Image (spheres, grey):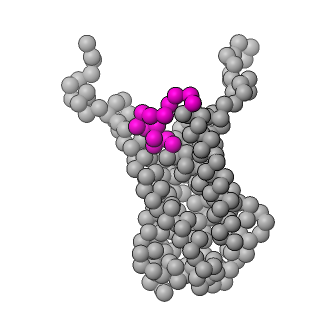
Amino acid sequence: MSLKTPLGRVLGLGSAKEGTDHWWAQRVSAVALILLGSWFVISMLRLESMTYLDVIRFIGVPLNAVLLSLLSLTLAYHSYLGVQVVIEDYVHASATKVVSLLLSRFAHVFVAIAAVYAILVIGIGS
Amino acid sequence: MSNSGRPLSPHLSIYRWPITMVLSILHRMTGVAMSIGLLVLVAWLMQAAAGPEAYLRFTASMSTVVGKLFLVGWSFAFFFHAANGIRHLAWDTGRGFDKSSANGSAWIVVGFAAIATAAFWWLAT
């Protein structure tokens, strides 16, 4: 006999109340990064040079700006999910753990905003 | 370990590392390395947005020997983590867990990461 309520069983969220959300989000962002990462590698190889003018011209193309923004946001998200697991696995003192998780979240949000802002500035400026 | 003096079961330092174990920890290490690399990727974009002089300072620092070593390291981390990530996605379907498949796919990942890193820098330069 199960001691779970019928509602708890049908929701399947477990004791952490989030079910497989974290695991699934990591997989979905991983699949997105296979596509976006491949695009980025090929784009970098096709770039004439890494000089200022060539890079600005590349980011100035609307499709490149959109894909680069998506890449940055997905990287930040996937990186956040991964670093979170690493901290939870290795940092056991609760104060240190909470502070590390908080700093990681702030840093990842900063990185995401900074990337999109920079791409917008370049895109609008060129 | 706080309760010293008590017998411990054999741990990491005792075993000869199988290839699957090496790849498991490498997946994590390359992931963390790329989380740090993400800061450099964003610095690249921010310096490009800041203008030609700031951008030149950025490319100059990445063109040093240390900078290039980091870039090569991050490219290897990318190819490795991507290939091993696909290996993980295949495992998620419940396939490839027997010993010979796990060892075989491990060597494919290592081979791909090495060749892709070499090819990338050969094509890039």
Is B88 located above or below residue B13 in the figure? below
Report which quarter residue B90 is drawn in.
top left
Residue interval drawn in magenta: B87-100
Residue A25 in picture, x, y percent from top left: 40, 47
Is A101 located above or below residue A91 in the figure? below
Residue shown at 68% from the left, 59% from the top: B118
Residue B71 in picture, x, y percent from top left: 68, 62
Residue B65 in picture, x, y percent from top left: 79, 66
Residue shown at 56% from the left, 74% from the top: A46
Residue shown at 46% from the left, 37% from the top: B91
Residue shown at 48% from the left, 81% from the top: A60
Is A41 located above or below residue A17 in the figure? below
Q: Is residue B29 in sight in this rendering?
A: no
Residue A124 in picture, x, y percent from top left: 44, 83
Q: Quadrant of the C terminus of chain B?
A: bottom right
Q: Is residue A25 magenta?
A: no
Is A78 located above or below residue B10 in the figure? below
State the count of labels: 0
A126 relative position to B37: left or right: left
B72 relative position to B48: left or right: right
B57 vs A28, nearest the viewer: A28
Q: Is residue B99 magenta?
A: yes
Report which quarter residue B94 is drawn in.
top left
Q: Is residue A39 in sight in this rendering?
A: yes
Extreme residue toward the right, this view: B65
A78 vs B20, nearest the viewer: B20
B62 vs A37, nearest the viewer: A37
